[in-house]
Amino acid sequence: MDIKLDPSRDDLPLMANTSHILVKHYVLDLDVDFESQIIDGTLVLFLESGNRSRKKSGSTEEACRSESNEACEFRKPEPCHVPVADTRTSLSQMGYSDFAICGKGERDTSGKDGNHDNQEQTYGISSSKHCCDTGNHGSEDFLLVLDCCDLSVLRVEEVDVAAVPGIEKFTRSPKLTVVSELRNQIVRELVALPADHWREQLDYYARCSLAPGCGELLFDTDTWSLQIRKTGAQTATAFPHAIRIRYRTKPQGRSVTWTSDQSGRPCVYTMGSPINNRALFPCQEPPVAMSTWQATVRAAASFVVLMSGENSAKPTQLREGCSSWHYYVTMPMPASTFTIAVGPWTEVKPETCSPSDLAAERSLSLSEADFRCAGICGHMEYPCRFQNPSATTQEIIPHRVFAPESLAGACQETLLQLLSPCLSAAHAVLGTHPFSRLDVLIVPANFPSLGMASPHIVFLSQSTLAGGSHLCGTRLCHEIAHAWFGLAIGARDWTEEWLSEGFATHLEDVFWAKAQQLAPHEAQEQQELRASLRWRRLQDESRNSPEQLQVLRPNKEKTGHVSDSGSSVIKHGLNPEKVFMQVHYLKPNSRMTIRTTIRDHPVTPTGAKPAKGYFLLRFLARRLGDDTYFSFLRKFVHTFHGQLILSQDFLQMLLENIPEEKRLGLSVESIFRDWLECPGLPQPLQTERQAGAECGLARQVGAEVAKWKRVNRRPRKRKRRGTEEAFEKLPPAADLTAGWADPGTTKLPWTLVPRWTLAKAWRLMKLLPDQLVLLLERLLEQKTLNPRTLRSLERTYRLSQQDAEVRHRWCELVVKHKYTTAYKTVERFLQEDQAMGIYLYGELMVSEDARQQQLARQCFQLTKEQMDRCSAQVVAEMLF
């Protein structure tokens, strides 16, 4: 069954047979051991047989195809006793109980395939086609296939849910005499409980997860999957609906990152890169496998456990030096969205609690009755916030900030001040927040992105904290936007990632403008400037990326199709270079300058896709008018939250909800043709960009560029006053406390900036951060800039103290012009801004300058042990 794939080019397989059987709920009970770098515990799956079971066909065999016709072997693990806890334990008790697990503290002695060696019992299967029998057909046993990789699976057993006291209420039919049918009936009734019984449902899930085992199941693992069967269970309906898996992660598992935080203390987090969560726990990865979960995690008492959970968990001490944390989720989500982070995080709290924060905290506790309110939703039933009157008017959801101790001060100054305005802005644009609360964590320096959103938790890079509030604010808005697009509304086919990234990129500008309380003309200027920057980036990527990576809907009419079993693939999912775009083109004689585009989700192949998606949405908003477009968007969110969509779902509803005169020839087919199914730059976008005039902020940058060109042409012998003196003098101190006094530029209102930084900000921010980025990009187009000009540039704008986006462009200028005086700035960037530094490694190597190449290799040697694995692999291929 093992599939051998080349990780440099192959697609990532999604093996789970979701068309036949679905996981409805996961219960995880885990121990985090930093000494062995292993997460160890049990996973209980509550299953529901699918309604798409079908007759046997050749396509079902692709879920476990082998290059040879070698028989699959199912393994029975060595006997292992699991002590049975009191099944009357309540949910809250279970969350903090020290549940005894067999083999706890023992070394992992499993073989390469993840199963036992010396005491295992092998059951031979006569033909490979039998182990591929994943449907309810024929005389062979049904096979449950889970996505699984880099795990040691130790034991699989059926759970005797019928032994739970009080479970009789879930046995509707008293005539059931077959015990296995009775157990499955209990699970069917449990997963079907109405939404207003969610607390009771979670409590019974917890009780059932602690029930005794009632028979070990045969299982086998290969590189990409775990296959489980029960002798005699020939259909998905007859297969046990509650099973327990005892397993351990591996230190090098690709879903789990063991590292140190910025204070040098050990921590671990999951990013699902590049194989999602299958190396964290066996699961169903396809997005259609929507499930809920609850998890109990134990770790040393000095650590904080953060997770995708609706509750703000607090630790419970189990014994000296050990604490337990419990989280749960009642909104069904794909397993790939599950996230956990364990480390010595410090909670950064506001110095004073504002009235809005208090109101948000008060509305956190919602009674079950709150979810019985009016409103019809199209998703499967769950306690939906869109039906809750209290939630719909909640502008700012409860939120917490966590960071390494060394960065707590920076978070206090910047991040904490931005959260409430950004959350309020998002609510003003889209309405009800899909999730009841939000944790924000500053992750370790090796995190390979500026940010990542998961249910109830956002990871942010430390690179967002330096150089003012702009980069932190825009990135925070981007991740908040993912709560609606990417999480509450997901893509049914992961090749259509523009439905997540395109929307988040478009909405970050809208949210950020509202968070700054900009006047309409100021917001428009700022958004036009950011559009100009993205247009430059998109042009670069369209010229230098493979055409197949530029298509937003690569599967065309087959988008959303899966095999009979439900298995599918993620295109280019295993290629570690896919997130770095132009790294493919770093040839020894190339002089290409690589532009920076930071990606959110590692399974997407190129940065051109979110940029094209952003321009499509911007095109539609401009064509329809902002009022019409955003009014529709709120209606769309209300209609499709909690569901998976395809491009046509969005486009069809859009066109149906706007007047005929505003369509102006638009149709789903024309948008597919012009925007989603063609590589390169869409013709409507090219026409729009050619006809549009430069915005005022861009023209201001143009004047600055012309000035620096003149400075660069001055003869060396001429003594001139410092370039810095050419700028306007600092205004009187009284004007600074009144806000930004320069009428020629758009500035962040002083209410969002600590007053003590205003004078400093005036000196350093003569241009907006985005204007500085555009200025440096324009100067990068100059063939030569002399050291005197570069020195003046750095001093005028204090470039080494700006945000990471500006500093990246400054480092590019330093590398391009071999400005050795500023090489320390490049070294610092490569070590402290790893989320963006990979592009600089490329430019240092293509320069063919021995000193620059030595600098790149030295920095890599210092960081490679802590660097993200995919990033390290790509950099190593460039350097050696």
Image (spheres, grey):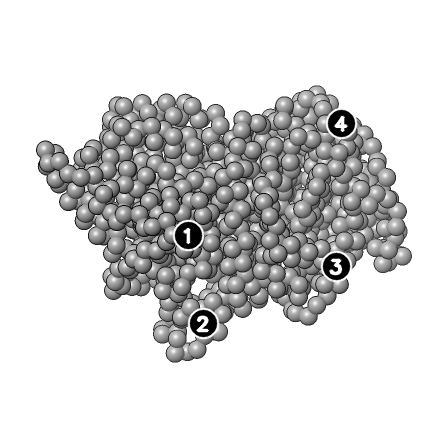
Earlier sequence position, callout 2 versus callout 1: 2
Q: Which mark is residue 367?
A: 3
Q: Which structural element holds mark 3?
A: loop
Could you tell whether 874 is left or right of 244 in the image? left
* Residue 30 in which image quadrant: top right
- The Cα atoms of the two marked residues, 1 and 4, are separated by 52 Å
Could you tell whether 722 is left or right of 531 in the image? left
Q: Nearer the viewer, mark 4 or mark 2?
A: 4
| Residue 73: % across, % down | 66, 32
Q: Which structural element holds mark 4?
A: loop
Earlier sequence position, callout 1 versus callout 4: 4
| Residue 196: % across, % down | 75, 60
Dots 4, 2 in contact, CB < 8 A: no
Asked whether 419 or 843 is in front, the reply is: 419
Dots 1, 4 in contact, CB < 8 A: no
| Residue 579: % across, % down | 42, 42
**For residue 274, above or below residue 193:** above
- The Cα atoms of the two marked residues, 4 and 2, are separated by 60 Å
The amino acid at mark 2 is Thr
Q: Nearer the viewer, mark 2 or mark 1?
A: 1
Could you tell whether 505 is left or right of 321 in the image? left
| Residue 533: % across, % down | 32, 51
The amino acid at mark 3 is Ser
Dots 3, 1 in contact, CB < 8 A: no
- Residue where numbered disc 1 is placed: 737
- Residue where numbered disc 4 is placed: 320
The amino acid at mark 1 is Thr
